[in-house]
Image (cartoon, rainbow, N blue to C red):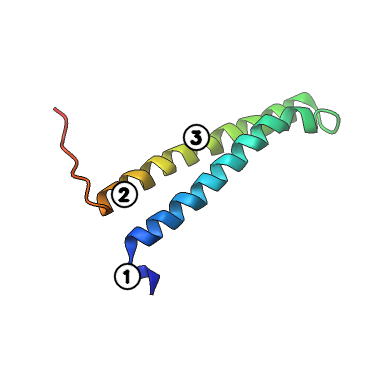
Amino acid sequence: MLRNHPVVLAQFATHFVNGQHEASQRGLAEVRTTLSEFVEPDIAEAAAQAWLEQGARLARTRRAIALLDEALRGRVFVPKL
């Protein structure tokens, strides 16, 4: 039933991706302090890099969803020259 209502699906996607993005930011903030006594520094740094990459991917996805949501709600996009 909801697949016939793309604005509702876009809102679901917005909340879902926002939650993932917030979690990745928390993970990045904690990774070095919580793992430092359990793994080597290069492993903690690799984990931090993975969080950074995930955060960047989610930021791009958030932007794409926001543009889609705006278009579904009637915003007209004007090409820039």
Number of marks in the image? 3
- The amino acid type of the residue labelled 2 equals Leu
> What is the secondary structure assignment of the residue under circle 1?
helix
Tell me where residue 12 appears, x and y as whole percent.
45, 57
Residue designated by label 3: 56
Q: Earlier in the sequence, mark 1 or mark 2?
A: 1
- Cα distance, mark 2 to mark 3? 19 Å
- Cα distance, mark 1 to mark 2? 15 Å
Residue designated by label 2: 68
The reply, left or right, for residue 7 in relation to residue 77 is right
Q: Measuring 38% from the left and 61% from the top, which residue is drawn there?
A: 8
The reply, left or right, for residue 70 in relation to residue 44 is left
* Residue neighbourhood size for the residue with mark 3, other residues' Cα within 10 Å, grouped as few (<14), some (14–19), many (≥20): some
- The amino acid type of the residue labelled 3 equals Ala
In the drawing, what numbered circle is on residue 4?
1
Q: Is residue 36 above or below residue 3?
A: above
